Amino acid sequence: MTKSYLEKAKEKLISYQNISFVNQDAEKLDLGEKFDCITASYLPKYCTANVLIKNCLEQLNVGGKIILHDFIYPNNKLIQKLWNFHFKLLYLAGFFIPNWKQVFIDLPHLIRTTNWVKDYETSMNNYGLKIYKQNLTLGSSTIIVGTKVA
């Protein structure tokens, strides 16, 4: 996350006084206090599951939740075709936004090859978290919630 994204999020959520915004390496997370909820979108595929979960747990109250969301490659063949087409369109858009062109090559490959869902389920299970998982957006993303029970 860039500082400009963080500032935009702060502006949009200014009325919520109980939300903290942090720009820090997730695998070296050190918040200095405990929280009821730690959430991240589009991050899990870039991190090592055991490292991220361990660091989050150290910052989480009992009963607190770790909520992770990211893209997955859909299982449904029709949705796969739509998904692939979507990224081809984004790749073409990259010709007009040159600094994004490589992202639209690398990101689909990463999403197709990552096992982030299985890795985080295994890690959360190994750390004794109660796990809830749901596929979203026609099976093109997943949300995993781990609750710290003890």
Image (spheres, grey):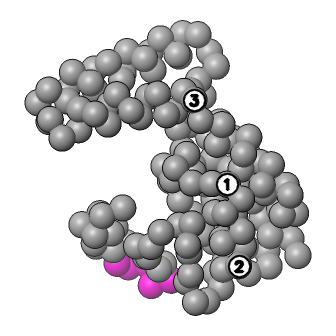
Residue 89 against residue 48 in the figure, above or below? above
Task: Locate residue 89, reporting x and y percent.
Answer: 28, 20
Q: CA distance from mark 1 to mark 2?
A: 14 Å
Query: How packed is label 3: few (under 14 Cα within 10 Å), some, or many (20 or more)?
Result: few
Task: Locate residue 60, reporting x and y percent.
Answer: 70, 77
Q: Main secondary structure of the magenta part?
A: loop
Q: CA distance from mark 2 to mark 3?
A: 29 Å
Disc 2 marks which amino acid?
Glu
Q: Which residue is mark 3?
A: 113
Magenta segment boundaries in residue numbering? 14-18
Under circle 3, the secondary element is helix
Q: For this rendering, which residue is in front, 121 or 64?
A: 121
Under circle 1, the secondary element is helix
Residue 48 against residue 5 in the figure, above or below? above
Locate residue 22: give its quadrant. Answer: bottom left
Q: Which residue is mark 2?
A: 58
Specify whether 73 is left or right of 84: right
Disc 3 marks which amino acid?
Thr
Q: For this rendering, which residue is in front, 102 or 143?
A: 102
Quadrant where the N terminus lies?
A: bottom left
Query: How packed is label 1: few (under 14 Cα within 10 Å), some, or many (20 or more)?
Result: many
Q: Are marks 1 and 2 in contact (CB under 8 Å)?
A: no
Q: Mark 3 vs mark 1: which is more N-terminal?
A: 1
Q: CA distance from mark 3 to mark 1?
A: 15 Å
Residue located at (63% from left, 54% from top): 48
Under circle 2, the secondary element is helix
Task: Locate residue 129, reporting x and y percent.
Answer: 83, 62
